[in-house]
Amino acid sequence: MRRYFVAICTLCILSACNNSPQNKGGVEWKEEVAGVWNVSVGTPEKINLLSELNISPKFDAIRKMGEASLPVSQEDISFEVVDGKTYIRFPLEKDEKIFGLGLNFKTVEQRGRIMRLHVDHYTGKDDGRTHTPVPFFVSSRGYGAFINSARYIDTWVGTSVRKDSKNPPVVRDRNTDKNWEAQPYSDNLEFLIPAEGVEVVLFAGPTMLDVVRRFNLYNGGGALPPRWGLGFWHRVPSLFSDKEVNEEVAQFEKRGFPLSVVGLEPGWMSRSYPCTYEWDRVRFPDPDHFVKNLNDQYIKTNVWINPYVSPDGELYDKIEPYTGSHTVWCGIVPDYSMPAAQKIMVEHFEKHQLDKGISGYKMDENDGYDFWLWPDVASFPSGMPAEQMRQIYGSLMQSVTMDMFRKRNTRTYGLVRAGNAGTSSYPYVIYNDYYAHRDFITALINSSFIGVLWTPEVRSSGTGEEWLRRMQTVCFSPVAQLDAWADGTKPWSFPEVEKEVREIAQLRMQLIPYLYTAFADYTFEGTPPMRAMNLEEGYQADTQTEKGVLDATANPYAMAVKREVKDQFMVGPSLLVAPLFAGEKERQVILPQGKWYDFYTGEFAGEGEVITVSPGLSKIPVYVKEGGIIPLWPAVTKVKDEKLPLEVRHYGKTSSSYNLYDDDGKTFDYEKGDFSRIVLKVDVNTNGDKTGKAIIPEGTKVWSFSDYNFRFMTGK
Amino acid sequence: MRRYFVAICTLCILSACNNSPQNKGGVEWKEEVAGVWNVSVGTPEKINLLSELNISPKFDAIRKMGEASLPVSQEDISFEVVDGKTYIRFPLEKDEKIFGLGLNFKTVEQRGRIMRLHVDHYTGKDDGRTHTPVPFFVSSRGYGAFINSARYIDTWVGTSVRKDSKNPPVVRDRNTDKNWEAQPYSDNLEFLIPAEGVEVVLFAGPTMLDVVRRFNLYNGGGALPPRWGLGFWHRVPSLFSDKEVNEEVAQFEKRGFPLSVVGLEPGWMSRSYPCTYEWDRVRFPDPDHFVKNLNDQYIKTNVWINPYVSPDGELYDKIEPYTGSHTVWCGIVPDYSMPAAQKIMVEHFEKHQLDKGISGYKMDENDGYDFWLWPDVASFPSGMPAEQMRQIYGSLMQSVTMDMFRKRNTRTYGLVRAGNAGTSSYPYVIYNDYYAHRDFITALINSSFIGVLWTPEVRSSGTGEEWLRRMQTVCFSPVAQLDAWADGTKPWSFPEVEKEVREIAQLRMQLIPYLYTAFADYTFEGTPPMRAMNLEEGYQADTQTEKGVLDATANPYAMAVKREVKDQFMVGPSLLVAPLFAGEKERQVILPQGKWYDFYTGEFAGEGEVITVSPGLSKIPVYVKEGGIIPLWPAVTKVKDEKLPLEVRHYGKTSSSYNLYDDDGKTFDYEKGDFSRIVLKVDVNTNGDKTGKAIIPEGTKVWSFSDYNFRFMTGK
């Protein structure tokens, strides 16, 4: 909640005892809650990444994690205010790895990188410009740090070398020494924050997952989507009319494809780029009926918007006084940090969308890139500098729209192109127009370090094979969505794989109980539902660095090349997903320590080893951890308010249990305790005989399950 | 000179009457000299792009250009200090074009671009990061502005649109209007300087060339290289010994290839990356004799260095107290802004290079890129922030080494990877490792707007054709250099074009009188020797903007594509050079207004039109303006102190004259008036009969010419 953070800030300002240019001594450390320290450097700014957001840290959940200490000492971290900027330096150990620092698409480990963390459209280079450039890192030593500044933050992650280094690199002569390196070893992680002070929050481990969990809980815990949000989404072409949408929806039904959400693209609006947020009455003569009709079929409607207000709608004159100095695509830019602006926007959104039954938004174009955003010389009526506005605009839009739904005690789930730290509890998934299947997986992995969700949405593909491979990936992501805004593809657009696409979409629906529970763990415990392997215990895969080869033109400094594993990830507690890509017949999968089993057959796959698999086109390789319990619904096509029989699969040979989550799937009542946990338990006796039971304590409310059918996956 | 600029700065600070966050009223305009206005905004910083350099503005030469007024009014330019930063806004008219703003490699016109002007290695994108990101623009309206800040400057060149715009773009609905544009029309050129004030200098035209000339003269006028600097340069492989160098030099002589300068790469030094600046006594046992022996053959020696000091040399302990907090490639970084550091470096350079007869330096690695430079969190003993140090480090190295040679009254000519505003008078040419032939020409064109020199050096090529085409280009550039540091190529490495390569290198030597005069015009009048066509009167070539085609993946916003002419340029007053590129058999050449003639034959080529030419492999298309007079030396292989007969070519049908420059070619005595001008005059009478004469007033000192043979190029 905002008040809370303002209070923290005031404290920082008061405690900044020294305002002089070099106030090494002026840093105050404070343990805020077990395992979380707040450090105030110089004079932190009034506006930071959290100050304008309405979030409530989950201190109780953090406390439950117990006491923990930092593996670095306070003396080893240096803070200075110089030249109007704050310099921060963390020590790095020889084999230490650094993760996080924004939604990167090509790299997972960040040591060796230089970045400017800057909200922007990702354009193919991990240089810090991305949709969610969260200034938070996780160290393999078992701690993390969050630099709470809404400025563009420069960072040198193990690249800068100090004269006074304790572990200086070896001096070599490039003329004659073959071991000369273009990038000598660095034992620093340095930050430059262009402000005369900053709040830094440190999070303890001992594991990296603990660090991430504390960070997520500090930011309010993860979002819990409504249950329907985990079904299958389809976005229709931009200029579709209500009739065309209805015809497409009927096709889904006819062909047996699941569908939970229909997404409308800009054409639902009377004007787009800039926007009116009002219905186009030619394409949608009766929006109330249109949305109600879909709702009656258990299909939610999500609508695209961007932030820029068109002069052609009823909103313009009202919001104009609360907009910035510059226009974007000729639209004015609401200052979402002002309560008056929020009120006007919310009233308009309520009238034209929420009152009509719209379930949520896809909020586009709040990320950049520079060519279609306000410049940093823009001014806003609240007085917030354009730089800070850019860093938190996506977060603000999430906050304001989330609250609008919360007021109705209705959960929403949507898409957004920009966010930052503090948005973990907002039910929005990051997406973009960058479109490389492999890089999508890397982004999914990276999202788990920084408290955001990411969807590798499906759009155009060159072949049926590619279409299916992308579909297989997206069905294991936070939103399983096909986006046909520009090309009008349908799930069945490639007839040669229609059956397989249907199957994977059905599997997505079956997985909803498992995914919903994984999201509950995100909400209550801070555990990301889709995660990097690096957050998994027993996972060991070293990044390989290959010595560079001198090429006078292409590589004159013989720079080394890093190869890292970034194409497999964890979903929930037990599933390991290793997608294949178009053109591939087989791939390698790294199985962490412990036994792993084939998800489809239950066959033993390996343990702590690299396996090579060739699952055929129809399958995406998925593995289950020893003792893994996977609850599956039947292959429904809609998410209704109904109890469904549950198939409870158990993998491997050991006794285990699983804490199935359930609630009404749509309101915020769970926050007041109105939810339940059903323990699914499998016992294996000394003969290897298995028995399963669902433990439902007396008085437990059950919303979604009618029966519990245990299935022991033995691989036979 | 430094004192001069410090005085200006003090004035600015005193005149900043208002320090409040919004001091629109606190701007003071002052006409510094005819056609040049100095504007002080807020509180300009002590350190700027010129404050640390030793340059003397050529006010007398500016005054000679006469009075001139600005085509923009003071009221139309907005200055504000907000959020600790200075915002500046210039108006743009509908068809106004903007040039300059750093050494860009892909674009000439800058309208429509967003850049952060930041010294760096150019890496393939015109985003402001380049070797010389000079914050100076030239407007086609006939004025220019120089933002004198050594900070990273952000600029939006006709991209940002203000709500209060006088010429707002048309609002369009993207849903239905085919004329919707991803980038609406903007009538602003905006700058963000991250400092609480700045000095801005405005330069009047009326032509763009006048603007450039005033800017160059303001920065001390252009550099005048020693005459030998305009001969042919060859850099040998890095680990060559004295013996190998001498053998290679002998090959040049034997094969009849010209050679003026031999460049030694890192291997001449006992240690490189970091550097000792001391000779390697294994590869060069007797450097004194080695250099003297070359000098005796009229071959100058140029040596490679980078700024980073090795612990293995005698310099380290002396310079250590004057170095920054961080190392680069394990070398310490001298703070060249400190007189004490300058003295130590100069004494070392004098002892190991100048006293041994070295003619100059190739100063590498002072540009970046980020991965091998000090980070912006580095500190320096002078207290200069790392950001400012980065922006002027190359300029400082130029200044200090230039002064070292000046003290000996000996001109130098060398290469450097970084510079900025204020370096026009320093005899250094920018180069890099980026290697695209076409982009090299674009950089050569752009260098003429921003007061720097650029060489498209020749290195490896895939084919003899490419080798020859690159060689043809470089022979019309500020330094005609082959750089074989890594691959050991020789001019004759492609036997199939050895003859043609020799011919073009010979032509370079023949052109020295013409080029040397062009450089004198740069020095005394500020006219760039190699220039953009856009600075040529009568040149009209509109940039074509093609409407973008929507592609959901590759171009989802249907962004427009610009095509501009950036592959031909002017050399001296009369030559138009239009290089061909590997794979091309023909090309188009845009001839400005007026008649143009083929350089080789004198044949009429066209006037104010686009011609298509196919000159064959052996020729680079070169055209001469009506009345053009081109003085040519014989095809010498060395630049000696000797008088040579001059061939004076006249092109076209009209009377004309040419002001041939001459001096001793090596000292600074020309600055005291010890130079001469010989008027080469051709009269054409009404019958078309031509007579030529060289007018050498009584008592004129002549250094380089023995005879004047007029040749009237009639094309027959």
Image (spheres, coloured by chain):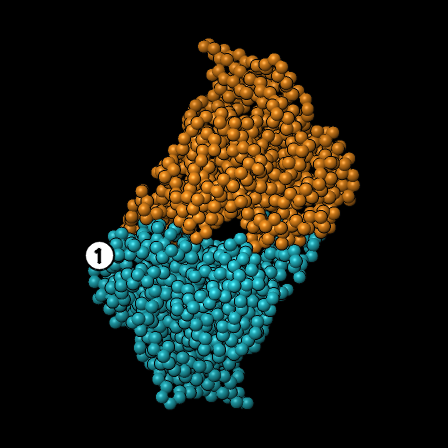
Chain colours: A cyan, B orange
Reading the image, the residue beneath label 1 is: A282
Q: Which sits in the foreground, A176 or A258? A: A176
Q: Position of residue B53 (x, y in %)?
A: 58, 39
The answer to which quarter of the image holds residue A639 is bottom left
Total count of labels = 1
From the viewer's perspective, tell me whether residue A470 is left or right of residue B472: left
Q: Which sits in the foreground, B390 or A601? A: B390
From the viewer's perspective, tell me whether residue A281 is left or right of residue B253: left
Is B226 drawn above or below residue B100 in the view shown?
above
Is B259 drawn above or below residue A269 in the view shown?
above
Check disc 1: other Cα within 10 Å, few if <14, some if 14-19, many if 20+. few
Badge 1: chain ID = A
Figure quadrant of the N terminus of chain A: bottom left
Q: Which sits in the foreground, B686 or A499? A: B686
Name the residue rendered at 73%, 48% in the picture.
B313
Q: Is residue B714 visible?
A: yes
Name the residue rendered at 68%, 32% in the picture.
B408
Is A384 drawn above or below residue B214 in the view shown?
below
Name the residue rendered at 45%, 50% in the picture.
B85
Q: Position of residue A661 (x, y in %)?
A: 40, 79
Name the residue rendered at 42%, 50% in the picture.
B20
Name which residue type carries label 1.
Answer: Val
Q: Is residue A156 visible?
A: no
Q: Position of residue A564 (x, y in %)?
A: 56, 62
* Mark 1, secondary structure of its residue: loop
Q: Position of residue A396 (x, y in %)?
A: 38, 62
The answer to which quarter of the image holds residue A7 is bottom left
